[in-house]
Amino acid sequence: MTTNPVKITARNVQVYYGDNHAIKDVNVDIEDKTVTAFIGPSGCGKSTFLRCINRMNDTIDICRVQGDILIDGEDIYDRKVDPVQLRAKVGMVFQKPNPFPKSIYENVAYGPRIHGLARGKAELDEIVEHALKRAAIWEEVKDRLNAPGTGLSGGQQQRLCIARAVATEPEVLLMDEPCSALDPIATAQVEELIDELRQNYSVVIVTHSMQQAARVSQKTAFFHLGNLVEFGETDRIFTQPEDPRTESYITGRIG
Amino acid sequence: MSDTPVTKRKGSLLVQDARTIKRNRAEKRFQMYGIAAISIGMLMLVILLTTIIARGTGAFQQTFITLNVPLLAEKLDKKGNRDLADIKKVSTFGYAPLMQAAFEAKVAELGIETDLKPKKMAALLSKDAAAQLRNFVLENTDLIGETVEFQFLAQSRVDGYLKQRVTRDSIAKDKNINATQLDLVDALVASGHVVKKFNLDFIIGSDASDARPEAAGMGTAMMGSFFMMLVVLSLALPIGVAASIYLEEFAPKNWITDIIEVNISNLAAVPSIVFGILGLAVFINYMHLPNSAPLVGGLVLTLMTLPTIIITTRASLKSVPPSIRDAALGVGASKMQSVFHHVLPLAAPGILTGTIIGLAQALGETAPLLLIGMVGFIASNPPETIAEGLMSPNSAMPAQIYEWAKRADPAFYERAWGGIIILLVFLITMNAIAVLLRRRFERRW
Amino acid sequence: MLVLIVLVLASFGYILVRRRAIASVGGDQRILHSLPSYYGSTALMFIAVPSLLVLALWLLIQPMLVQNAVIGLIPAETINEGSSVGLVMSDVRRIADGLDTAIAQGAITSVNAASLNVETSNIRAQLAEVGVALGSDVAAPVLAAAQRYRAMNANGSTAMTLSVLTLALIGFALAYRMTTAAFRARNTVEAGVKTLLILAASLAILTTVGIVFSMLFESINFFRMHDWRDFFLGSKWAPNFRGDSDLSILPLLWGTLYISFIALLVAVPIGLFAAIYLSEYAGPKTRAVAKPLLEILAGIPTIVYGLFALLTVGPFLVSVFGRGEEGFLSVEWMSGATAVLTAGLVMGIMLIPFVSSLSDDIINAVPQSLRDGSFGLGATHSETVRQVVLPAALPGIVGAILLAASRAIGETMIVVLGAGAIARISLNPLEAMTTITTRIVSQLTGDTNFASPETLVAFALGLTLFVLTLGLNVIALYIVRRYREQYE
């Protein structure tokens, strides 16, 4: 197994929701050009930790984050860091497809527009087309770019959301259970897409499905009750888990 | 995948690029707009309230002039047998000389020098003063022949002078008062015979004619409002609750119910003046109910408040969980019994809150009252019986305020603002009760 | 009086029937189908409801019938130039009422009243003595009509009393006979109560029908007397109580729309930004304080705003834009306190909470997932609001603004006191203009003559206003409802 350079480093991360200690002392290194899966039972903190990586938790008033999360060696919770700039670098795809109530084109163009990535209409068209192609949805929508994004099917919507995230040229892509609202065929398409995206990005995916984690990821982290229990090569985690908790989860005894 | 059309922006997260700085400034500006909007709203509220208080509190104080009036028997009771019928024959004109004499005597006693004629001195008193004196004499005939100390209302210019509304500059062309009279007022203020004090009559008294703003009060209009609210409460509450019970609990889901529902929400937004037209056409022109009667006002306001009450009542009926209904039905109660015995009592606080808010809305409503004739006359006699209160012409608080606002004399403006204070006190009390009720009975299912 | 008798009868019925029910089972209540009080209530319902209903209907219909019968008695030639049937009818009514008063006060006996004659007695003088003032001497046909009116009313009242009482008694007899142990009294009562509930619910429909008809009839009368083309298309509003007035709605409509426009110009930006701040930025504490405070503005009666416009805002604007050299700007643009700007500004303040609380609800209904999506792409909060939240909430906000507009168009007290009384079409916001609602008030207050187009025009104005606001409301409510469904 090749090791890629480390993209994200987390050291002693603690997260509190009010009085609730949601994440307890998590340390992890996430590699570039790799798909890392976070698995664990509901409420184990995997989504919370994911949202720490692009500071989405800032929008929740009662949430406090302690410890360091570094991207390319820079502390993203440093006071000088602007979350807006950070999120342009760390894109996110959500559990439920959430296309904006705009046209397909406008959905994808939204990110590049606010970040000023395109000079002129032609360049923007190019970015949109490129992003849609990369999200493997171009062929399906190229004739109706002006149709509302909300009119697409669930799987198409989710791929549109991925295209939307890709269009801002992020370096890290966070995915919060991206397939949980999709049917099996759409899921397969999205999984295929994730595998392709690995070539350019560091992808972190939260998933409920162990099969999915096994299919798409190279590294897997198992969370339980706010603790990072085990982290390692996906193959090893699923075949020879070191921690008994991991083992009972994988064999279906907790979860 | 190397055909990326744009170059990746490499740069430290620790350094904000120019674009981010610009965007963050826009963000700050946008937030400022929001804060500014809220501040403007608050500012307007503060300005409105301070204006009302600053301009209206004066109405609760009035200037009085203290005089000792000799109730001369030869003027008031020529026959000397203290027969009430005889004394009644002396009109208010007959009392005027007494007051002039009393004024002259007071000025002489205090040693104030003035070249005013007694008649001009007495002109400082309200035109209401003679009637005040006469009423006193008619009630206390045994005091005829003695000298009694009175506090008479001063006329509105004197009152305005003490409240700084009238100045020596502003009276140049005023035929109601002149500078010499003001000199006398100054002297009397110094001696403590002209004083400004709390005026209960403003709250409980009746309206007065154009020439006597100092004597005008809200009391009768308050009675009018009270009787209207009585009508609204006794009609709108039962009808509103009945309608809501039907719509919420019994109505089948069909197009008729739909029409009724759309209708109710539209009625809630119909301009109030349209209800006034309805009242004029139906209650007065067609049914020949008396003009200006609180009964008619109450009926119009009932129709106007019904949608509000229905909407809030339905909301509180809806908030009673179906499990309560099921429980009642389960022990063999009929649908009707389950609603009246269980659902309705549980929804009662919510219904009450809604009703109070509806009443408060009705209490402040003016426009429909203009059309059914509750303005434009002087509501002078407070009603004595309930029937009279409902049927005899009266005004209402907001209509009375409007009436005062239309009159030319600025002294009435002060009373209009004062009237608003009284009206707002009622509204604030009602809303406070509603809020308390809601807090007290708020239930989380 | 009649109502009282019926109610007494009903309570008697309640007691009697309840007793009979208990007696019929020998005091053992368990054998009865329903509780004894239900039997009593059946009687109460049978006696009171039909008779009171008939009473109410009778009171509504009788005046109509009598009026139609009496109008037939008035020959066309008695109606003078410039007068109308309506005017003569009101005379007839006044004479008839006057005669009744005279009899009640003992000024004339009822026999004399019935045989009154225009030649032998001066009715005007006689009625004046009892305090009924007539505008002119009484013509013979009018007197005849008045006599007929009295007679019909008297007959009608007798017949009404009789039929109401009969109905009550029949109801009582029915209830009494039906009372047996097996009689399903509860079901009967419940069916009755349900009918009452339905009646209460349909009152809302009745109100609307009443509004429409009361205005429609008088509007039709108006258009018989006045050309509709002048009303809708003319350009001048100049009522003249000697007749031949220019009564066109356009100048009034212009004033109404202009003032509403200014009001919305004030209320929409302020209300919308306030709503955005409250729902997107403000913490729960700020929200808990600021929202109710803003809503106080909506709870203040409009008369207060009217006074505020007339006595505070108006004079302030004059001191800025008027008074020549003494003024703040040393200009002479504004002469009086009442002006479009005065009314518009104050109405705008009143509308702020309407726009803000409705928009606040609507913005809150935008799903959080859309905001997350935008934040996740690195948008700032304001970019998210402007480019994602507001477009998503747009239909709802448009609905809220339409509701506010309908409110502005129908607002009366602020414009009555603050806008002035001069009908004109002008673009200058510092001039006084007048509105539909102000004209309705001024045409219908004071001494009104319901036979002249100058008074009746108010009904046509009212109908236009009603249609206008109803249209806006229907559209607005439809949009808002559709919007809510979209995100449910």
Image: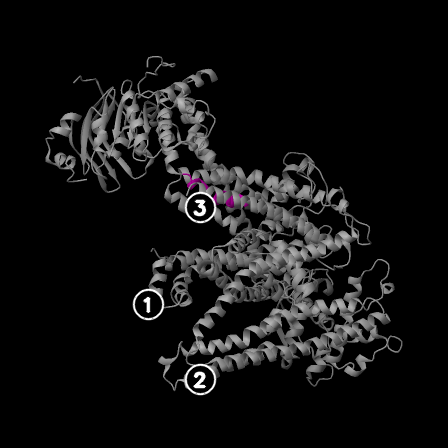
Q: Residue at x 58, y 56 (%)?
A: B365
Name the chain under label 3: C
Looking at the rendered structure, the secondary structure element under dot 1 is loop
Disc 3/disc 1 C-alpha distance (Å): 45 Å
- In this view, the residue in front, B116 or B261, is B261
- Residue type, mark 3 in image: Lys
Where, by quadrant of the figure, is residue C343 drawn?
A: top right
Q: Residue C413 placed where, x, y %?
A: 62, 51
Residue under disc 2 on the same chain as residue under disc 3: yes
Q: Is residue B174 left or right of residue B231?
A: right
Disc 2/disc 3 C-alpha distance (Å): 59 Å
Residue range (magenta): C351-366
Looking at the rendered structure, the secondary structure element under dot 3 is helix
- Residue type, mark 2 in image: Arg
Q: Kindly identify which numbered label has been placed on residue C19.
A: 2
Dots 2 and 1: beta carbons under 8 Å? no
Can residue B112 be seen at all in this image of the molecule?
no
Q: Residue B312 placed where, x, y %?
A: 47, 56
Identify the mark nearer the N-term, 2 or 3: 2
